Image (cartoon, grey):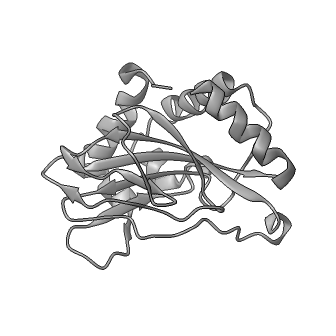
């Protein structure tokens, strides 16, 4: 699935504007370059409201992904439900899995729908379970984020990597059905 640039450009433009970077938090990394994160977008952090973040575009993107997939009743993760990450040259996302922080979801799976709003000229590819996802800008991909370790390759060049990610809790019994639906849908 590919999102239209018209739909994603308000978020891309806002995120790439240095005057809005104070709304992001610095991501931990162990290499050169830096990464910024903007989490809790599902709860509209006050900084983003004051800085004019395009929430209307954000929720239209989420609605389009879920409508296309035919599922509207997913439970969005509370802690990192909707997030943006911004990586400059030299940065890469650390290898990790998404682990529920709420006890009520400790037996749930976490799935994420991701898209690169800005793709570096080289590097920045998502790696899930040791498989490289070579997505284009605005192309959506699916990650079973609790089940599989995931990371990104190192970013090269001046164009940053900007990732928009939507996360949901899924009961293990529903995960295979949803994965099958995604695989026929994409």
Q: Hey, which residue is sitting farthest front in the picture?
A: 131
Q: Hey, which residue is sitting farthest left in the picture?
A: 158
Out of 66 and 40, give the one closest to the viewer.
66
The percent coordinates of residue 5 (x first, y second) are 36, 23
The percent coordinates of residue 186 (x first, y second) are 56, 27
* Residue appearing at x 40%, y 52% in the figure: 126
Residue 159 sits above or below residue 136 on the image:
below
* Residue appearing at x 49%, y 29% in the figure: 57
The percent coordinates of residue 177 (x first, y second) are 79, 39
The percent coordinates of residue 146 (x first, y second) are 65, 62
Residue 37 sits above or below residue 12 on the image:
below
Count of marks overlaid on the render: 0
Q: Is residue 10 left or right of residue 169?
A: left
Q: Hey, which residue is sitting farthest bottom in the picture?
A: 30
Residue 178 sits above or below residue 4 on the image:
below
Q: Is residue 82 left or right of residue 176?
A: left
* Residue appearing at x 38%, y 38% in the figure: 135
Rendered image quadrant of residue 68: top right
Out of 30 and 40, give the one closest to the viewer.
30
* Residue appearing at x 13%, y 50% in the figure: 158
């Amino acid at each position: 699935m590919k999102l239209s640039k018209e739909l994603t450009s308000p978020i891309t433009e806002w995120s790439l504007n240095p005057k809005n970077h104070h709304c992001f938090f610095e991501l931990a990394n162990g290499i050169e370059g830096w990464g910024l994160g903007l989490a809790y977008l599902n709860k509209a952090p006050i900084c983003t409201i004051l800085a004019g973040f395009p929430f209307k575009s954000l929720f239209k993107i989420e609605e389009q992904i879920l409508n296309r997939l035919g599922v509207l009743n997913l439970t969005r993760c509370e802690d990192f439900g909707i997030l943006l990450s911004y990586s400059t040259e030299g940065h890469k996302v650390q290898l990790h899995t998404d682990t529920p922080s709420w006890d009520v979801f400790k037996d749930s799976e976490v799935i994420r729908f991701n898209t690169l709003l800005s793709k570096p000229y080289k590097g920045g590819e998502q790696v899930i379970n040791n498989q490289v996802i070579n997505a284009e800008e605005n192309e959506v991909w699916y990650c079973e984020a609790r089940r599989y370790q995931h990371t990104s390759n190192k970013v090269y060049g001046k164009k940053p990597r900007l990732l928009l990610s939507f996360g949901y809790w899924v009961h293990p019994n529903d995960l295979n059905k949803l994965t099958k639906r995604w695989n026929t849908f994409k």
